[in-house]
Image: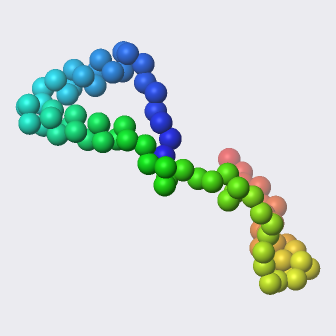
């Protein structure tokens, strides 16, 4: 999951909203935010897993035919 960086003005707006929470809710939020800081190495994608060759039992001519047959040709021009 990616990170989101926000500026101080946005943080102040969030804090203005969160300031109205009761202490119990604030503590639960602090715990959740603290737990989110722990990085889990299991979620990291291995860059090598993104590379490889196409594996399929179909013949290349058959794949090309499938691609061409799936195309939609629409020459109808809509009028205003």
Q: Is residue 50 above or below residue 24?
A: below
Name the foreground residue: 61 vs 36. 36
Indicate whether 37 appears above or below 47.
Answer: above
Q: Position of residue 75 (x, y in %)?
A: 82, 61
Query: Residue 23: which quarter of the image?
Result: top left
Q: Is residue 46 left or right of residue 23?
A: right
**Where on the picture, by quarter, is residue 73?**
bottom right
**Please, which colouring scheme is shown?**
rainbow
* Residue drawn at the location 43% of the way across and 24% of the way down: 6
Q: Is residue 31 left or right of residue 77?
A: left
Residue 22 appears left or right of 41: left
In this rendered view, identify the residue nearer to me: 35 or 12: 35
Between 40 and 58, the one lying in front of the other is 40
Picture quarter containing residue 14? top left
Image position of 18 with respect to 78: above or below = above
Q: Is residue 65 visible?
A: no
Percent x, y of residue 69: 82, 76
What residue appears at the point 77 percent right and 63 percent down from the top-left corner?
52
Q: Residue at x 49, y 49 (%)?
A: 41
Point out the residue furthest to the right here: 61
Q: As drawn, is 40 to the left or to the right of 34?
A: right
The picture places residue 18, in percent across and down from the top left corner, at: 20, 28
Q: Where residue 48 sits in the image (x, y, percent)?
A: 70, 55
Look at the picture and state if 55 lies above or below 11: below
Visible in this render: residue 9?
Answer: yes
The residue lying toward the viewer, choosing from 26 and 43, is 43
Query: What residue is at 48 percent from the left and 46 percent from the top?
Result: 1
């Amino acid at each position: 999951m990616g990170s989101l960086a926000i500026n101080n003005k946005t943080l102040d707006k969030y804090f203005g909203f969160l300031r109205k929470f009761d202490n119990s809710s604030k503590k639960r939020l602090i715990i959740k935010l603290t737990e989110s800081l722990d990085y889990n190495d299991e979620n990291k994608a291995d860059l090598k897993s993104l590379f490889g060759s196409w594996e399929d039992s179909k013949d290349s001519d058959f794949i090309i035919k499938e691609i061409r047959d799936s195309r939609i040709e629409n020459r109808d021009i809509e009028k205003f």
